[in-house]
Amino acid sequence: MVSAAAIAAAPPSRVLIFSKTAGFRHDSIPVAVTALREIARRQSLDADTSEDASVFAPDRLQRYRAVIFVNTTGDILDPEQQRALEGFIRAGGGFMGVHAAADTEYDWPWYGELVGAWFLGHPPGLQTTRVRFGHDGIAARGREWRVTDEIYNYRRNPRGSVEVIATVDEHDYTGGTMGDDHPIAWCHGFEGGRAWYTGLGHDMAMYSNATFLRHLRRGLRYVTGRADAC
């Protein structure tokens, strides 16, 4: 297990961007990785990128303040690697999940609690809806943002176990299954660490959208302990 002392002593300026897939593979992964590397750089964070699950070992995870799952899918970690991630979080590490991170590791209950909710399905194609943020500083004007992306439905509403930071309006599009309260981004403290997730990020164009990049930037600051607000 990664010790709390090791996490505390780890270089505070390094994160891992992980994009392994064992199911659907998003075309947006390369641009997502590039965007996240740039977001990290602008926060004076070094970023390693990998699709090699062997990095999930206690001695290797000690190098990082946070791990970012960007459009991962399916069963990507073996039991020993899963235990390494659990130890990393319990020692105070951070986890950031983007879009299909919720379409990952369905047979690992702990991971479902870490992310907050698993993917259920989505309407066909890209659709446009209003995103309502719970805080200022992300949308260009006020707290609403019109976005065109693939809008996930989830197996449960995570509200009550997480802090919801953004919702979508199902009246704007077809195929929503969660009703009047449809969270699309959230965060929470979890077993000694921090977790942040956004369901947005399917479409390649999202990773050049200033509002979405501000959204990701805020998430990275939260999971690396540089901000208490998520």
Image: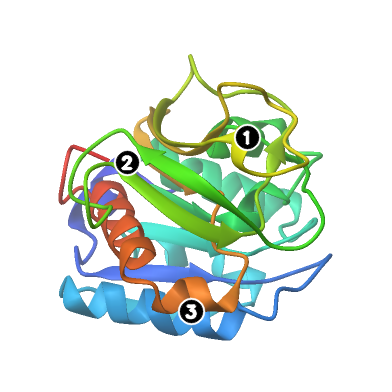
Q: How crowded is mark 3: few (under 14 residues within 10 Å), some or many (20 or more)?
A: many
The amino acid marked with disc number 2 is Gly
Q: How crowded is mark 1: few (under 14 residues within 10 Å), some or many (20 or more)?
A: some
Residue sitting at x 44%, y 47%: 88
In front of the other: 211 or 2: 211
Residue 116, horizontal then vertical, whole percent: 56, 32
Decide if residue 118 is on the left or right side of residue 89. right
Decide if residue 184 is on the left or right side of residue 162. right
Report if the CB atoms under discs 2 and 3 are less than 8 Å apart: no
The amino acid marked with disc number 1 is Glu
**What's the CA distance linking mark 3 and mark 1?**
29 Å
Residue sitting at x 60%, y 41%: 172
In front of the other: 60 or 74: 74
In front of the other: 26 or 150: 150
Q: How crowded is mark 2: few (under 14 residues within 10 Å), some or many (20 or more)?
A: many
Element on which disc 2 rests:
loop
Is residue 179 placed above or below 140 in the rendered structure? above
**What's the CA distance linking mark 1 and mark 2?**
36 Å
Element on which disc 3 rests:
helix
In front of the other: 82 or 174: 174
Q: Name the residue under label 3.
A: 33
- Mark 2 or mark 3: which comes first in sequence? 3
User: Residue 110 has which mark?
Assistant: none
The amino acid marked with disc number 3 is Val
Decide if residue 38 is on the left or right side of residue 74. left
Q: Mark 2 points at which residue?
A: 92
Q: Mark 1 points at which residue?
A: 170
From the image, state whether disc 3 or disc 1 is nearer to you: 1
Residue sitting at x 68%, y 52%: 80
- Mark 1 or mark 2: which comes first in sequence? 2
Is residue 27 placed above or below 59 in the rendered structure? below
